[in-house]
Structure formats: structure tokens, C-alpha cells
Amino acid sequence: MIIGIECTAHTFGVGIVHKGKILANIRDMFMTESGGIVPIKAAEHHKLAAESVWNKALEQAGIEERDIEYIALANAPGLAPCLLAGLHFAREKAVKLGVKIVLVNHCIAHLEIGQSLGAKDPVLLYASGANTQILAYESGKYRVFGETLDIGIGNLLDKVARYAGLGFPGGPKLEKEAVRGRYIELPYSIKGMDAAFSGLATKAQQLLDAGKTLKDVAFSIQETAFAMLVEASERALAHTGKKELVLGGGVACNARLQEMCKIMCKERKARFYCPEKPLLVDNGAMIAYTGEVILRGAGKEILLNPENIDIKPRERTDEVDVSWR
Ligand code: AMP
Ligand code: MG
């Protein structure tokens, strides 16, 4: 029985997994009416939410605290104050329960959870707030085949939404606006499998200043930015010869992005996997699931005592030694 804690950014989540089966997945997200995420405030939110999210997860799984055998903690990458809030909570619980901890890289968890749907050796398009990467396994590591050269795709959407007076998260609000929008040409910036989004953000803000409607701007951002990601993902599929694409991260909730991926995969006869929304956004179940995968593959030597864990706010996906595979 493994319990996973997610706390890398805006969400505090707890999930419980047993032999690959998800028994619970509870989350509480830090949101704002206007303005973005202030790391310290998000961390305060996590500290306040932690105990209740933990208890709700135990209740949903129908287990007692003493049934827990291991704790999986997302210790990287993310906002340092948020990661620390999670670390302190995990440490306190581990000491209390007398259990050890397995550390999980958050980006890798988004990839591994795709394997719960049946993907064996996929390319992952990880489209999230701060992270935007195209990942796949190759020679002992999850390699970064392509990534944003500046801001994450979700940050782009949130930034433009914030400029238009909408709160966080902005992506879902822009998606609603985009439904009735028309296309305006925007900068399309892709270099190999890397993409850049900040020029797009500036241009979108200029268009709003010039009186273009939010719905047209929202539609055009989605069409342009998502096309860039799908183009890079297709290139990664072609380059690696892999036949599966997994979508992950909060922006993957977007129906238009899902549709574009689906079309591209169909055209090149690749299989497309998109987890259900509770497993797509930041969540504790994917951390517990990945913790179990790591333990199964790497053995118990990978476990750490609570006093020996630390956060790694800037750990890159390709720094992690994938010893469990
Ligand atoms: P994550 O960082 O993976 O938790 O994802 C959070 C990001 O996902 C934020 O930038 C949100 O604005 C974005 N997001 C959530 N839902 C949607 C959606 N339906 N369309 C576009 N972006 C979304
Ligand atoms: Mg994420």
C-alpha cells in the first residue's frame, strides 16, 4: 500500500495505490480571482490543506493510516516553498508511521501514469503550466527531445488570461472563449523540437490592446501554440520510431489540443493515450503509482529514511537515473 504526495506547485494532492490500482486520488488546488501564483501563498495553502486531503484519501481508499507501507513524495521539480511544505508533511507522517520514502520526479510521474492506460514505450507531450517538454525513454534516461526555450505553454495561456483580467488558472477560461473565435496569424516559433512562446504572449497582448476580441485572440493562441507542440511531438515520434503518444499536464485537459494530437497520431498510425482529467492534472495518484513502479523495478534499496530526503526544485527530467526500467 503506497500513498503519494503531490505538492510541486499549485496543487496539494494525495493518492493511494495498491498493485497498480488507484484506490484514492484527492486534491486541493490553490486558485486566485486575479493575479498569478505567489509561491509562499501556495505553500501556505498546502500546509492548511494537507491533513484534510490526506484524511479524505484514506477514507476514499477505505484504509487506515497504519495500512500504509511506503510514502512516495514528489520532491522535484517545482516551487521551493511548495516542495518544502510537502517534504515536511511527508517527513512527519513517515516518522509517525515508521515507513520509508521513495522520491519521485513530477514530470516523470506524468509520463509513467500514461503506462497505466497501456502505453509501453511512448513519447510524452508534457504540456503543463511551467513545464513543456517532449520526453521519451532512451538508454537509461527519460530524454528531453524538445522543450520550451522560454515559458511553459500553460504560463503563456495564464499570462494572456491575466492580461485580459481573468484569474488563475487562465487556460480553461481561454478555452471557453476560443470556441467562437476566428484565426489571426501569430508568431510560430519552433526550432527542431524546441518551441518558444514568449513572442506569442507579447503579440497576443498587443492584439488585445489594439482592440481585437478576446475570443479571436484565444482561438488564435490555441491554434498556433498547440500546432507547434503537435509538430514537435510528431518529429519526436518520427525520430525515435516510437508508436505511442501520451499526453500529460494541465494543458492536456484542453479539448482542442487533444483533438490535434488524435489527428496527428491517426495520420501516422500511432496510438494516442490521454489519461482522464483527475490523472492528467497535478495529482497524488500519479506520484503513488510512479513510486510503486520505481520500487517494483529498483527494489527497496531506493527507499530513504525520512531524515535523508531533500527537495530538488530544478531537477531536470534527464538527470534522473531510470534504474527501475
Ligand atoms: P499543471 O501545471 O500541469 O498543473 O497545469 C496547470 C496549467 O494547465 C495552467 O497553466 C492552466 O491554465 C492549464 N490548463 C488547465 N486546464 C486547461 C484547459 N482546459 N485548456 C488549457 N489550459 C488548461
Ligand atoms: Mg504537472
Image (cartoon, helix red, strand yellow):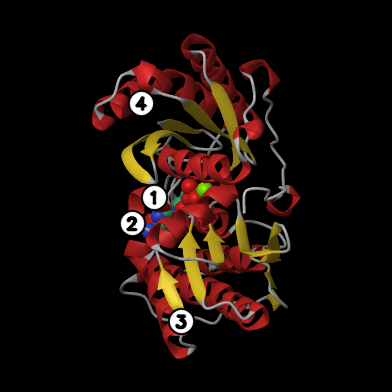
Amino acid type of the residue that numbered disc 3 sits on in the rendered structure = Cys
Residue 89 locus on image (x, y percent): 52, 19
> Given contact means CB atoms under 8 Å apart, are the residues at marks 2 and 1 in contact?
yes
Q: Earlier in the sequence, mark 3 or mark 1?
A: 3
Residue at image mark 2 = 276
For disc 4, the neighbor class at 10 Å (few under 14, some 14 to 19, many from 20) is many
Which amino acid lies under the numbered mark 1 shown in the image of this protein?
Leu
User: Does the beta carbon at disc 3 come under 8 Å from ligand 1?
Assistant: no
Mark 1: few/some/many CA within 10 Å (<14, 14-19, 20+): many
Q: Of helix, strand and loop, which one carries label 3?
A: helix
Residue ID at (64%, 25%) = 304
Q: Is residue 283 left or right of residue 185?
A: left
* Residue appearing at x 72%, y 43% in the figure: 315
Is residue 184 visible to us here? yes
Residues at marks 3 and 1, CA–CA distance in whole angstroms: 21 Å
Asked if residue 266 is positioned above or below residue 64 in the image, the reply reads below
Question: Residue at 45% across / 45% down in the picture?
Answer: 286
Identify the image quadrant of the N terminus: top left
Q: Which SS class for mark 1?
A: helix
- Location of mark 3 (residue): 265
Q: Is the distance from the Cβ of mark 2 to the nearest ligand 1 atom less than 8 Å? A: no
Please name the residue that numbered disc 1 is placed on. 279
**Which of the pair 172/239 is nearer the observer?**
239
Q: Earlier in the sequence, mark 2 or mark 3?
A: 3
Q: Amino acid at mark 2?
A: Glu
**Residue topped by disc 4:** 53
